[in-house]
Amino acid sequence: MAETPLYLNPDLDLNKRLQDLLGRLTIREKISQLWHEAPGIPKLNIPAYNSWSEGLHGVARNGRATVFPQAIGMAATWNPNLIQKIADAISTEARAKYHTALRKNGKTDIYQGLNLWSPNINIFRDPRWGRGQETWGEDPFLTGTLASAFVRGLQGDDPVYLKTAACAKHYAVHSGPEKLRHGFDAQASLKDLHETYLPAFKALVQNAQVEAVMGAYNRVNGDPACAHPYLIDKVLREDWGFKGHMVSDCWAISDFDGPHAYTPNPTESAARALKAGCDLECGCRYAHLLEAFEQGMITEEDIDRALTRVYTTRFKLGMFDPPERVPYANIPEEVVACDAHAELAYQAAIESVVLLCNKNNILPIRSDLKSLFILGPTTASVEVLLGNYYGMNSRLTTLLEGLVGRIPEGVRTEYRTATHVLHESQAHSKWMYQSAASHDLVIACMGITPHMEGEEGESIDSAENGDRTRIELPEVQLQALRQLSEAGAKTVLVLTGGSAVALEEVADLVDAIVFVWYPGQEGGRAVADVLFGDVAPSGKLPVTFPKSTEDLPPFEDYSLKGRTYRYSEKEPLFPFGFGLTYGKVECTNLQVPREALPNQPLHISVNIKNAGPRDVQEVVQVYVKHLNQPLAPLQQLVAFQKCTVPAQSETTLTFELDADRLTLIGEDGKPFWPEGTLELTVGTCSPTQRGLDLGAAPPLTATVHLH
């Protein structure tokens, strides 16, 4: 009886198993495993494996799956516990689909593997960027907190095995323009790098132990992100202690000798990327690694280092162990798109809804409603449920289906498309808007669609490869709202989209605005239940909504000056962290120490009172402002909690702020403890007068002296 090879013995130390496996491979075989589409190695019974799979808001591009709200919608929940449950459900379905494909086909194809190339934690610095919908918003702390929860859900809590392998992307300083991404050189100061663009990546590496990091297409201060000596070797590996593998964005290394003009030929592109620490390529340049090896550009040690990292992940996924040893190997395929996951998608869609405007408390819809008119180009759209990088499901519930399923019998209801999403037309008829206005209430479903914003090549209505040039609502939709207003309609506007929309004129034309993002398969049901008051909205904006496109700095400028709530001095239309609910809480009794010391946490507490008649779910947010510190952001989110406060009751929340949340970043990119006065604000929105004017609870403020 043949002796079991060491690499197949799950009781041995992982390093011994890896060394045994490497010793059985030729140079050609080793190199072949450094592509995303790795061929099988028959002599070792290693099946072909494709590392490219997506799990942004559900298992994507692999048939049936639960479709959760797009990432930016999940960010609007401000609920890390919910996010972790969602990611756990995604990894459960990915596991089931992987093992089913392996049993049926003896191998897995693209989008069927366990390396999920999610989450996207780039900072959403500019609302024109079409892929901002994939991110967790504009704030590095919020992004790092929510995405860390997502990674924990994807990777599981087993001490030996990964459930799936999460991937933090796109490292780094990557947020448009899409049209330029293959040759763009993002210029960022060391301060902006370490204060804004890198903290979320650091959080995922050090707090969530993310297994993989994906390099971006662009250059950063001259060097390609996938071969960046400072970002990869110094920051990622040395400073943060990252032990996982790094993968390139797809065909990004081909850009080295293409648009970047960084290397003279494909062979040198492959060599530069491998030696810089990019272990796995999605693309085709690593086909030249053998040539690079033969020419002495790389060594076998370089190849072994990369392969060890790549295969460490595969071993941790249990790919070389008996199924009975791997706790996730026997998940049945019945979990895919199951009822329990659908309910989780419903809960996520509920909590993602942001109530921006509610004049005269027109929402929730009154029980004595007699007639309702539903109109708008996104009302019956499946696309606005999905966003991008999505799975498919047989129970996608459009806004129209959700509303019709919830409208009480006896309410006279009509529906018209009424206008296009984007393209101008002469189809507007005054009689239709006058007819709509004759009803007790109009629900207008409009906004942005994935045809207008997304990744390069995905958005068929975008002339900017997926980006937008203007963030206002399209004129054809504005004109429809103007006619409704002129006819005297009472209008609730339900807006879809993956990014901020400038709504200054719109806010004057309608009675309520509900922003629902791309809400996933249960979006229609969730939105209807919010509108009719079965549940109250609790979402908060993870991005600032500017008043107009003109308020934005140039798109290609990566400086944070004038960007996001942290550095923009322009008054927003709807501030970061804002969102109304059906009711209102009061913040009282803020307890804050008078002094704080470096290396010691700061403990604070606050009471949240709900004097209203219904339970309220609220996100309590903590911001700091360093007074007399010219390098400091205008405000900085440092903590938050989502809590339920029952009607006629009061609850106490406590926060522990690590000292590093109170530090500042100098021009050299290094943190320092800023002695002086710290202003600390606790409320339900970022600290702005605009938030108060819109109805946010008055915040509480205290000062702390930093020694």
Image (cartoon, helix red, strand yellow):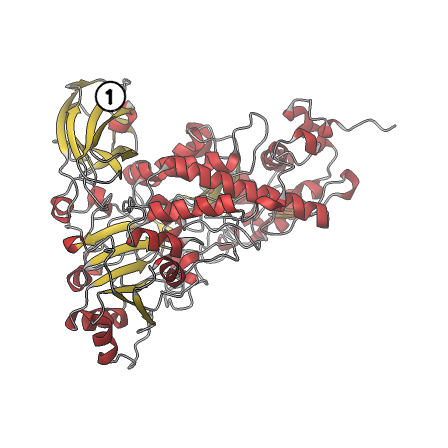
Question: Between residues 581 and 137, which one lies in front from this camera angle?
Answer: 581
Camera-nearest residue between 385 and 237: 385
Q: Quadrant of the C terminus?
A: top left
The structure residue drawn at horizontal position 28% and vertical position 44%, both measured from the top left corner, is 538
Helix, strand or loop status at disc 1: strand
Left/right of residue 57 with respect to residue 605 in the rendered view: right
Q: Quadrant of residue 640?
A: top left
In the drawing, does residue 700 fall left or right of residue 537? left
On the image, the x and y values in percent for residue 14 come to 64, 26
| Quarter in which the N terminus is drawn | top right
Q: Is residue 345 above or below residue 155?
A: below
Label 1, residues with CA under 10 Å away: few <14, some 14-19, many ≥20: some
Name the residue that disc number 1 marks: 602
- Closer to us: 530 or 106: 530
Residue 539: % across, % down: 29, 45
Q: Position of residue 531 (x, y in %)?
A: 29, 54
Outermost residue on the front side: it is: 410
Identified by mark 1, the residue type is Leu
Residue 329 x %, y %: 64, 36
Compared across the picture, whether 663 is left or right of 392 comes to left
Q: Residue at x 34, y 57 (%)?
A: 497
Q: Is residue 448 above or below residue 591?
A: below
Q: Is residue 389 visible?
A: yes
x 25%, y 19%: residue:
598
Q: In this orientation, which residue lies closer to the viewer: 600 or 184?
A: 600
Horizontal relation, residue 246 to residue 674: left or right: right
Which of the 4 image quarters holds residue 130?
Answer: bottom left
**Residue 48 can be seen in this image:** no
